[in-house]
């Protein structure tokens, strides 16, 4: 059985999924990160001494601050009605994962030992397109720990061709 927060996220996508975009989901992920790093918000949501209307108003202001529209305010209303406002962080955090799965979108973190030019990025994206069906979203970052080479990582996949990876494989083989 799925966790309750994940079930709320799925229900939210069933109702409002057609109104969501990757940009909105990025803003929602920013809110999720904010709530994770500000535990006091969740703490105050659990306090019974604060009335529900005050909690809702504070959360509405957070929605406005993170440019999240009416669907998220309706989510707050639903969670409030069910006395589940403290689940908001977990529900919002599950949204992106569920949306990406539902729409067959695969985000990849492409790490390289140096900055890649667009002409170097194209073969990487073509490789990923051959390996994975669906939409590929690549984020490129420099990781000097690779020494030389690249690593391609998503929540479900990992490919690495680098000197660091070869050294690690040799170390494992020699330590047996």
Image: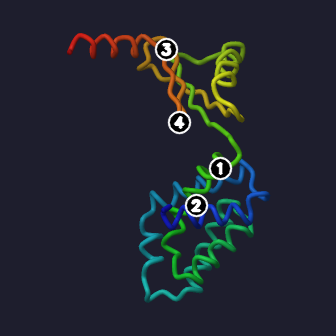
Q: Which quadrant of the view contains residue 77?
A: bottom right
The residue drawn where x is 45% and y is 62% is: 38
Residue to which mark 2 is pinned? 92
The residue drawn where x is 52% and y is 58% is: 34
For label 4, the crowd category at 10 Å Cα-Cα, with few meaning under 14, some 14 to 19 and many 20 or more, is: few
The CA span between labels 4 and 1 is: 20 Å
Residue to which mark 3 is pinned? 161
Residue 162 drawn above or below residue 2: above
Residue to which mark 1 is pinned? 26
Residue 99 drawn above or below residue 65: above
**Image location of residue 68, percent across then percent down:** 70, 62
Q: Nearer the viewer, mark 2 or mark 1?
A: 2
The CA span between labels 1 and 3 is: 29 Å
Residue to which mark 4 is pinned? 156
Which element is circle 4 on?
Answer: loop
Q: Nearer the viewer, mark 3 or mark 4?
A: 4
**Image location of residue 17, percent across then percent down:** 74, 58
């Amino acid at each position: 059985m799925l966790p309750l927060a994940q079930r709320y996220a799925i229900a939210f996508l069933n109702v409002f999924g057609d109104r969501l975009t990757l940009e909105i989901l990025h803003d929602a992920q920013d809110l999720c990160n904010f709530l994770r790093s500000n535990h006091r918000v969740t703490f105050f949501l659990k306090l019974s001494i604060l009335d529900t209307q005050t909690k809702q108003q504070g959360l509405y202001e957070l929605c406005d601050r993170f440019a999240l529209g009416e669907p998220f305010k309706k989510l707050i209303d639903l969670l409030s009605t069910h006395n589940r406002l403290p689940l908001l962080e977990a529900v919002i955090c599950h949204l992106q994962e569920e949306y990406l799965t539902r729409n067959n979108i695969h985000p990849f973190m492409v790490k390289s030992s140096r900055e890649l030019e667009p002409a170097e990025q194209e073969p990487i994206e073509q490789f990923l397109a051959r390996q994975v069906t669906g939409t590929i979203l690549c984020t490129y970052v420099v990781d000097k720990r690779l020494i030389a080479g690249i690593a391609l990582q998503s929540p479900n996949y990992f490919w690495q061709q680098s000197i660091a990876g070869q050294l690690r494989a040799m170390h494992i083989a020699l330590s047996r």
